[in-house]
Image: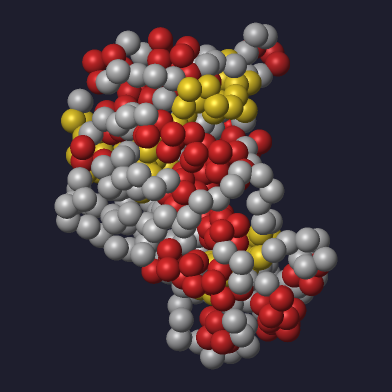
Amino acid sequence: MISLGGTIASTGADASAGVTPRLSGEDLVQAAPQLREIADIETVEFRKVPSGDLTLSDVVALAHEIEGLFDDGIDGVVVTQGTDTMEETSFALDVLVRSTRPVVFTGAMRNPTTLGADGLSNLVASARVAASSDAVGLGTLVVFNDEVHAARFVRKSHTSSTATFQSPNCGPLGWIIEDRVRVVARVSRLGYIGDVVAGEMPDVALLTMTLGDDARLVSRVRDAGYAGAVIEGFGGGHVPARTVPAIAELASQMPVVLASRATSGELLESTYGFAGSERDLLSRGLVSAGSLDALKARVLLSLVAATTDTHDDVVATFRCVVDSLWTFSSGDER
Ligand code: ASP
Protein backbone atom coordinates (compact mmCIF):
# COMPACT_ATOMS: atom_id res chain seq x y z
CA MET A 1 0.00 0.00 0.00
CA ILE A 2 1.54 3.22 -1.17
CA SER A 3 0.25 6.35 0.53
CA LEU A 4 0.29 9.80 -1.03
CA GLY A 5 -1.95 11.74 1.37
CA GLY A 6 -5.39 13.13 0.48
CA THR A 7 -8.64 13.09 2.44
CA ILE A 8 -8.25 9.42 3.40
CA ALA A 9 -5.18 10.50 5.43
CA SER A 10 -6.48 13.88 6.60
CA THR A 11 -7.12 14.78 10.22
CA GLY A 12 -6.72 17.96 12.21
CA ALA A 13 -4.78 18.80 15.34
CA ASP A 14 -7.21 21.65 15.82
CA ALA A 15 -10.71 21.08 14.42
CA SER A 16 -11.21 24.78 13.76
CA ALA A 17 -8.26 24.91 11.35
CA GLY A 18 -9.50 22.22 8.96
CA VAL A 19 -8.00 18.81 8.20
CA THR A 20 -4.75 18.20 6.34
CA PRO A 21 -2.94 15.02 5.23
CA ARG A 22 -1.26 13.68 8.38
CA LEU A 23 -1.85 9.93 8.60
CA SER A 24 0.72 7.52 7.25
CA GLY A 25 -0.07 4.41 5.25
CA GLU A 26 0.84 2.42 8.35
CA ASP A 27 -1.75 4.39 10.37
CA LEU A 28 -4.40 3.48 7.81
CA VAL A 29 -3.45 -0.20 7.76
CA GLN A 30 -3.47 -0.35 11.58
CA ALA A 31 -6.98 1.12 11.59
CA ALA A 32 -8.36 -1.63 9.33
CA PRO A 33 -7.51 -5.06 10.86
CA GLN A 34 -9.65 -6.72 8.14
CA LEU A 35 -6.74 -6.10 5.76
CA ARG A 36 -4.70 -8.81 7.47
CA GLU A 37 -7.24 -11.43 6.39
CA ILE A 38 -6.84 -10.40 2.76
CA ALA A 39 -3.08 -10.13 2.22
CA ASP A 40 0.33 -9.64 3.75
CA ILE A 41 0.65 -5.91 3.56
CA GLU A 42 3.70 -3.71 3.25
CA THR A 43 3.35 0.04 3.37
CA VAL A 44 5.33 2.64 1.45
CA GLU A 45 5.15 6.31 2.45
CA PHE A 46 5.53 8.05 -0.86
CA ARG A 47 4.06 11.56 -0.42
CA LYS A 48 1.77 13.20 2.15
CA VAL A 49 0.03 15.95 0.18
CA PRO A 50 -3.34 17.16 -1.10
CA SER A 51 -3.58 15.52 -4.51
CA GLY A 52 -3.64 18.90 -6.25
CA ASP A 53 0.00 19.28 -5.22
CA LEU A 54 1.10 16.15 -7.07
CA THR A 55 2.85 16.58 -10.41
CA LEU A 56 3.20 14.34 -13.42
CA SER A 57 6.82 13.90 -12.42
CA ASP A 58 5.65 12.52 -9.03
CA VAL A 59 3.47 10.05 -10.92
CA VAL A 60 6.38 8.94 -13.11
CA ALA A 61 8.41 8.36 -9.92
CA LEU A 62 5.45 6.41 -8.50
CA ALA A 63 5.41 4.18 -11.58
CA HIS A 64 9.10 3.39 -11.04
CA GLU A 65 8.41 2.62 -7.37
CA ILE A 66 5.62 0.24 -8.36
CA GLU A 67 7.74 -1.54 -10.98
CA GLY A 68 10.42 -1.97 -8.29
CA LEU A 69 7.87 -3.51 -5.90
CA PHE A 70 6.68 -5.91 -8.59
CA ASP A 71 10.30 -6.87 -9.30
CA ASP A 72 10.60 -7.65 -5.58
CA GLY A 73 7.68 -10.08 -5.84
CA ILE A 74 4.73 -7.98 -4.65
CA ASP A 75 1.49 -9.33 -6.18
CA GLY A 76 -0.62 -6.19 -6.23
CA VAL A 77 -0.49 -2.53 -5.28
CA VAL A 78 -3.02 -0.17 -3.68
CA VAL A 79 -2.28 3.55 -3.99
CA THR A 80 -4.08 5.84 -1.55
CA GLN A 81 -4.27 9.48 -2.58
CA GLY A 82 -6.60 12.46 -2.76
CA THR A 83 -9.55 12.12 -5.07
CA ASP A 84 -9.16 15.51 -6.76
CA THR A 85 -6.61 14.37 -9.35
CA MET A 86 -7.09 10.60 -9.17
CA GLU A 87 -8.64 10.42 -12.65
CA GLU A 88 -5.37 11.82 -14.03
CA THR A 89 -2.80 10.01 -11.89
CA SER A 90 -4.45 6.60 -12.24
CA PHE A 91 -4.64 7.01 -16.02
CA ALA A 92 -0.97 8.00 -16.22
CA LEU A 93 -0.04 4.76 -14.45
CA ASP A 94 -2.09 2.87 -17.01
CA VAL A 95 0.51 3.66 -19.68
CA LEU A 96 3.55 3.84 -17.39
CA VAL A 97 3.46 0.46 -15.63
CA ARG A 98 4.55 -2.52 -17.68
CA SER A 99 3.44 -5.30 -15.35
CA THR A 100 -0.01 -6.87 -15.68
CA ARG A 101 -0.32 -7.17 -11.90
CA PRO A 102 -3.12 -5.12 -10.30
CA VAL A 103 -2.61 -1.46 -9.48
CA VAL A 104 -5.61 -0.02 -7.64
CA PHE A 105 -6.18 3.60 -6.65
CA THR A 106 -8.46 4.59 -3.82
CA GLY A 107 -9.09 7.36 -1.31
CA ALA A 108 -11.97 8.92 0.57
CA MET A 109 -14.54 11.66 0.21
CA ARG A 110 -15.25 11.88 3.96
CA ASN A 111 -12.19 12.39 6.11
CA PRO A 112 -11.57 10.14 9.13
CA THR A 113 -12.95 12.73 11.59
CA THR A 114 -16.42 12.72 9.98
CA LEU A 115 -19.44 10.47 10.47
CA GLY A 116 -19.60 7.76 7.82
CA ALA A 117 -15.96 8.21 6.79
CA ASP A 118 -15.47 6.03 3.71
CA GLY A 119 -11.67 5.67 3.62
CA LEU A 120 -11.23 2.38 5.42
CA SER A 121 -14.02 0.58 3.58
CA ASN A 122 -12.53 1.81 0.29
CA LEU A 123 -9.12 0.61 1.45
CA VAL A 124 -10.36 -2.87 2.33
CA ALA A 125 -12.31 -3.17 -0.94
CA SER A 126 -9.21 -2.06 -2.85
CA ALA A 127 -7.06 -4.66 -1.13
CA ARG A 128 -9.57 -7.34 -2.14
CA VAL A 129 -9.31 -6.21 -5.75
CA ALA A 130 -5.52 -5.88 -5.71
CA ALA A 131 -5.28 -9.42 -4.29
CA SER A 132 -7.70 -10.87 -6.83
CA SER A 133 -6.51 -12.78 -9.89
CA ASP A 134 -9.54 -11.31 -11.69
CA ALA A 135 -7.86 -7.89 -11.55
CA VAL A 136 -4.72 -9.10 -13.34
CA GLY A 137 -4.37 -7.64 -16.85
CA LEU A 138 -7.03 -4.95 -16.44
CA GLY A 139 -4.64 -2.02 -16.27
CA THR A 140 -4.93 0.56 -13.51
CA LEU A 141 -8.19 0.55 -11.57
CA VAL A 142 -9.99 2.97 -9.29
CA VAL A 143 -11.91 1.18 -6.54
CA PHE A 144 -14.37 3.42 -4.73
CA ASN A 145 -17.78 3.05 -3.15
CA ASP A 146 -17.61 -0.73 -3.77
CA GLU A 147 -17.23 -0.25 -7.52
CA VAL A 148 -14.31 -1.16 -9.78
CA HIS A 149 -13.58 1.44 -12.49
CA ALA A 150 -11.06 1.38 -15.32
CA ALA A 151 -8.68 4.35 -14.99
CA ARG A 152 -9.12 5.12 -18.71
CA PHE A 153 -12.84 5.82 -18.26
CA VAL A 154 -13.28 7.06 -14.69
CA ARG A 155 -14.08 10.66 -13.78
CA LYS A 156 -14.61 12.49 -10.54
CA SER A 157 -18.18 13.66 -10.96
CA HIS A 158 -19.28 15.16 -7.64
CA THR A 159 -17.69 17.54 -5.15
CA SER A 160 -18.66 15.60 -2.04
CA SER A 161 -20.62 12.41 -2.77
CA THR A 162 -19.01 9.09 -1.84
CA ALA A 163 -20.27 7.92 -5.25
CA THR A 164 -18.21 10.60 -6.97
CA PHE A 165 -16.31 8.23 -9.27
CA GLN A 166 -18.27 7.35 -12.38
CA SER A 167 -17.37 5.94 -15.78
CA PRO A 168 -19.91 7.79 -17.91
CA ASN A 169 -19.33 5.91 -21.15
CA CYS A 170 -19.62 2.38 -19.89
CA GLY A 171 -20.14 2.15 -16.13
CA PRO A 172 -17.89 0.22 -13.75
CA LEU A 173 -16.05 -2.95 -14.75
CA GLY A 174 -17.29 -4.65 -11.62
CA TRP A 175 -18.05 -4.38 -7.94
CA ILE A 176 -17.25 -5.74 -4.49
CA ILE A 177 -19.95 -7.54 -2.54
CA GLU A 178 -19.10 -8.81 0.98
CA ASP A 179 -15.66 -10.38 0.43
CA ARG A 180 -16.21 -11.15 -3.27
CA VAL A 181 -14.80 -9.24 -6.22
CA ARG A 182 -16.98 -9.36 -9.35
CA VAL A 183 -15.43 -8.30 -12.63
CA VAL A 184 -18.09 -8.28 -15.34
CA ALA A 185 -16.23 -6.54 -18.19
CA ARG A 186 -12.54 -6.91 -19.05
CA VAL A 187 -10.64 -4.19 -20.89
CA SER A 188 -7.33 -4.99 -22.58
CA ARG A 189 -4.15 -3.40 -21.32
CA LEU A 190 -3.27 -0.06 -22.87
CA GLY A 191 0.13 0.01 -24.53
CA TYR A 192 3.12 0.68 -22.29
CA ILE A 193 4.50 3.92 -23.72
CA GLY A 194 8.12 3.37 -22.74
CA ASP A 195 10.45 4.49 -20.01
CA VAL A 196 9.74 8.04 -18.86
CA VAL A 197 12.32 9.71 -16.65
CA ALA A 198 10.96 11.64 -13.67
CA GLY A 199 11.89 15.31 -13.79
CA GLU A 200 10.89 18.11 -16.12
CA MET A 201 7.92 16.91 -18.14
CA PRO A 202 6.81 18.57 -21.38
CA ASP A 203 4.01 20.99 -20.44
CA VAL A 204 0.73 20.62 -22.24
CA ALA A 205 -1.84 23.42 -22.10
CA LEU A 206 -5.53 22.66 -21.69
CA LEU A 207 -7.88 25.27 -23.14
CA THR A 208 -11.65 24.97 -22.82
CA MET A 209 -13.66 26.70 -25.55
CA THR A 210 -16.40 28.92 -24.20
CA LEU A 211 -19.38 30.80 -25.58
CA GLY A 212 -18.05 33.70 -27.66
CA ASP A 213 -14.41 32.56 -27.34
CA ASP A 214 -11.93 34.57 -29.41
CA ALA A 215 -8.79 32.38 -29.06
CA ARG A 216 -6.86 35.04 -27.15
CA LEU A 217 -5.31 32.35 -24.96
CA VAL A 218 -4.66 29.99 -27.88
CA SER A 219 -2.33 32.50 -29.45
CA ARG A 220 -0.30 32.73 -26.23
CA VAL A 221 0.31 29.00 -25.80
CA ARG A 222 3.57 28.82 -27.72
CA ASP A 223 5.19 31.84 -26.08
CA ALA A 224 4.17 30.50 -22.67
CA GLY A 225 6.50 27.56 -23.29
CA TYR A 226 4.06 24.72 -23.84
CA ALA A 227 5.12 21.70 -25.88
CA GLY A 228 1.58 20.70 -26.82
CA ALA A 229 -2.04 21.65 -26.28
CA VAL A 230 -5.46 20.11 -25.75
CA ILE A 231 -8.41 22.08 -27.07
CA GLU A 232 -11.53 21.08 -25.16
CA GLY A 233 -14.16 21.98 -27.73
CA PHE A 234 -17.93 21.93 -27.71
CA GLY A 235 -20.05 18.80 -28.17
CA GLY A 236 -18.77 16.48 -30.89
CA GLY A 237 -15.54 18.53 -31.26
CA HIS A 238 -16.35 22.10 -32.33
CA VAL A 239 -14.94 25.57 -31.78
CA PRO A 240 -16.10 29.05 -32.83
CA ALA A 241 -15.20 29.80 -36.46
CA ARG A 242 -13.22 32.86 -35.43
CA THR A 243 -10.80 30.73 -33.37
CA VAL A 244 -9.87 28.42 -36.24
CA PRO A 245 -6.93 30.40 -37.70
CA ALA A 246 -5.17 30.59 -34.30
CA ILE A 247 -5.84 26.93 -33.53
CA ALA A 248 -4.66 25.84 -36.99
CA GLU A 249 -1.48 27.88 -36.59
CA LEU A 250 -0.83 26.29 -33.20
CA ALA A 251 -1.31 22.83 -34.72
CA SER A 252 1.40 23.66 -37.25
CA GLN A 253 3.78 24.45 -34.38
CA MET A 254 3.09 21.64 -31.86
CA PRO A 255 0.84 18.59 -31.35
CA VAL A 256 -2.71 19.81 -30.65
CA VAL A 257 -5.35 17.36 -29.46
CA LEU A 258 -9.08 17.94 -29.85
CA ALA A 259 -11.27 16.73 -26.95
CA SER A 260 -14.82 17.55 -25.90
CA ARG A 261 -16.11 19.45 -22.91
CA ALA A 262 -19.21 17.21 -23.00
CA THR A 263 -18.80 14.72 -20.17
CA SER A 264 -19.37 11.53 -22.13
CA GLY A 265 -19.37 10.13 -25.65
CA GLU A 266 -16.74 10.14 -28.36
CA LEU A 267 -15.62 12.83 -30.79
CA LEU A 268 -17.29 13.00 -34.17
CA GLU A 269 -15.10 12.60 -37.24
CA SER A 270 -17.14 13.19 -40.34
CA THR A 271 -20.51 14.80 -39.64
CA TYR A 272 -20.29 18.60 -39.73
CA GLY A 273 -18.77 20.76 -42.42
CA PHE A 274 -18.90 24.28 -40.94
CA ALA A 275 -15.79 26.29 -40.06
CA GLY A 276 -14.72 25.11 -36.60
CA SER A 277 -16.41 21.72 -37.01
CA GLU A 278 -14.70 18.43 -36.17
CA ARG A 279 -14.05 17.80 -39.90
CA ASP A 280 -12.49 21.23 -40.27
CA LEU A 281 -10.25 20.88 -37.21
CA LEU A 282 -9.10 17.34 -37.97
CA SER A 283 -8.27 18.37 -41.54
CA ARG A 284 -6.05 21.11 -40.11
CA GLY A 285 -3.91 18.61 -38.22
CA LEU A 286 -5.60 18.40 -34.82
CA VAL A 287 -5.53 14.93 -33.33
CA SER A 288 -8.75 13.40 -32.02
CA ALA A 289 -8.88 12.39 -28.35
CA GLY A 290 -11.61 9.88 -29.27
CA SER A 291 -13.47 9.11 -26.08
CA LEU A 292 -10.63 10.30 -23.86
CA ASP A 293 -11.64 13.34 -21.84
CA ALA A 294 -9.47 16.45 -21.95
CA LEU A 295 -7.79 15.85 -18.56
CA LYS A 296 -6.63 12.39 -19.54
CA ALA A 297 -5.73 13.53 -23.07
CA ARG A 298 -3.47 16.19 -21.55
CA VAL A 299 -1.72 13.63 -19.33
CA LEU A 300 -1.24 11.25 -22.24
CA LEU A 301 0.09 13.92 -24.59
CA SER A 302 2.61 15.07 -22.01
CA LEU A 303 3.85 11.53 -21.30
CA VAL A 304 4.05 10.66 -24.99
CA ALA A 305 5.97 13.87 -25.70
CA ALA A 306 8.40 12.87 -22.94
CA THR A 307 9.21 9.58 -24.68
CA THR A 308 9.09 10.55 -28.32
CA ASP A 309 10.93 13.25 -30.23
CA THR A 310 9.27 14.01 -33.51
CA HIS A 311 5.84 15.52 -33.99
CA ASP A 312 4.77 12.57 -36.16
CA ASP A 313 5.88 10.00 -33.58
CA VAL A 314 4.07 11.84 -30.77
CA VAL A 315 0.88 11.87 -32.83
CA ALA A 316 1.23 8.21 -33.84
CA THR A 317 1.81 7.01 -30.27
CA PHE A 318 -1.04 9.14 -28.94
CA ARG A 319 -3.39 7.71 -31.59
CA CYS A 320 -2.27 4.19 -30.81
CA VAL A 321 -3.32 4.53 -27.15
CA VAL A 322 -6.63 6.21 -28.07
CA ASP A 323 -7.39 3.42 -30.55
CA SER A 324 -6.87 0.77 -27.88
CA LEU A 325 -9.19 2.34 -25.28
CA TRP A 326 -12.14 0.22 -26.26
CA THR A 327 -10.43 -3.12 -26.68
CA PHE A 328 -12.03 -5.72 -24.48
CA SER A 329 -10.36 -9.00 -23.61
CA SER A 330 -11.29 -12.54 -22.75
CA GLY A 331 -9.01 -12.54 -19.70
CA ASP A 332 -6.49 -14.99 -21.16
CA GLU A 333 -3.62 -12.80 -19.97
CA ARG A 334 -4.37 -13.71 -16.33
N1 ASP B 1 -10.74 16.41 -1.49
C1 ASP B 1 -9.58 15.74 -1.83
C2 ASP B 1 -9.64 14.26 -1.51
O1 ASP B 1 -10.65 13.67 -1.78
C3 ASP B 1 -8.33 16.34 -1.39
C4 ASP B 1 -7.25 15.79 -2.26
O2 ASP B 1 -7.51 15.47 -3.41
O3 ASP B 1 -6.15 15.61 -1.76
O4 ASP B 1 -8.75 13.62 -1.05
Depicted 207 relative to depicted 143: above or below = below
Question: In terms of image quadrants, where is residue 134?
Answer: top left
- Percent of width and height locating residue 171: 32, 51
How was the colour assigned to the protein in this rendering? secondary structure
Depicted 177 relative to depicted 199: above or below = above
Depicted 50 relative to depicted 305: above or below = above
- Percent of width and height locating residue 46: 55, 26
Residue depicted at 62% across the width and 13% down the height: 12
211 lies left or right of 178: right
- Quarter of the render that holds ligand 1: top right
Residue depicted at 46% across the width and 27% down the height: 2
Residue depicted at 38% across the width and 25% down the height: 123
Q: Nearer the viewer, residue 323 or 168?
A: 323
11 lies left or right of 129: right
* Image quadrant where one finds the N terminus: top left
219 lies left or right of 66: right
- Percent of width and height locating residue 125: 31, 28
| Camera sees residue 224 | yes
- Percent of width and height locating residue 195: 51, 51
163 lies left or right of 212: left
Q: Nearer the viewer, residue 267 or 45?
A: 45
